[in-house]
Image (spheres, rainbow, N blue to C red):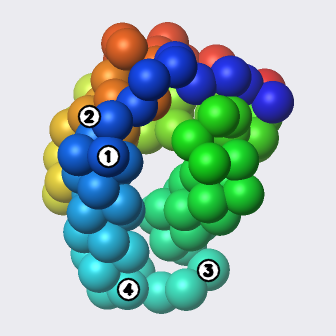
């Protein structure tokens, strides 16, 4: 589990959930099994379970990859998701987290 920064405000929590809703709405265009559907659902689940105290390791790894895609020619989906993932990361951790592989 990855601990989140302490002191997330109600406004920040509301913003994170608003971004999650944006990601879910956009991800429905790609189908339920796609990775862009998994991240917002996992974020929502972890944040609700932990009351904004932690993310599971798998969710953290997925968020780190969406914050830092490694493709020279980003897809439209990556261009949509990356700034939103970075904003979530900044709210939850106080910074954009580095990419991790596991």
Spatial CA span between label 2 and label 4 = 21 Å
Query: In the rendered view of the protein, which quadrant contains the C terminus?
Result: top right
Q: Mark 1 sits on what residue?
A: 10
Spatial CA span between label 3 and label 1 = 31 Å
Q: In the picture, residue 53 is in which quadrant?
A: top right
Residue 64, x across and y down, in percent: 52, 29
Spatial CA span between label 1 and label 4 = 27 Å
Q: Which mark is residue 28?
A: 4
Q: Residues within 10 Å of mark 3 (few under 14, many from 20)?
A: few
* x 62%, y 60%: residue: 48
* Circles 1, 2 touching at the beta carbon (< 8 Å): no
Which callout, 3 or 4, points at the residue further toward the start of the chain? 4
Q: Which of pointers 3 and 1 indicates the residue nearer the eye?
A: 1
Residue at disc 4, secondary structure: loop
Residue at disc 3, secondary structure: loop
Q: Which of pointers 2 and 4 indicates the residue nearer the eye?
A: 2
Residue at disc 1, secondary structure: helix
> For this rendering, which residue is in front, 8 or 100?
8
* x 37%, y 85%: residue: 28
Q: Mark 2 sits on what residue?
A: 87
Q: Is residue 97 visible?
A: yes
Q: Mark 3 sits on what residue?
A: 33
Q: Residues within 10 Å of mark 2 (few under 14, many from 20)?
A: some
Residue 83, x across and y down, in percent: 21, 38
Spatial CA span between label 1 and label 2 = 16 Å
């Amino acid at each position: 589990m990855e601990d989140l920064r302490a002191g997330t405000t109600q406004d920040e929590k509301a913003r994170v959930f608003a971004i999650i809703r944006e990601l879910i709405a956009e991800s429905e265009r790609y189908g339920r099994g796609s990775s862009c559907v998994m991240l917002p659902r996992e974020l929502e689940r972890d944040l609700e379970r932990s009351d904004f105290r932690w993310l599971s390791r798998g969710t953290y790894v997925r968020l780190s990859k969406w914050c830092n895609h490694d493709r020279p020619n980003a897809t439209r989906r990556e261009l949509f998701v990356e700034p939103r993932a970075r904003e979530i990361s900044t709210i939850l951790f106080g910074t954009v987290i580095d990419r991790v592989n596991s």
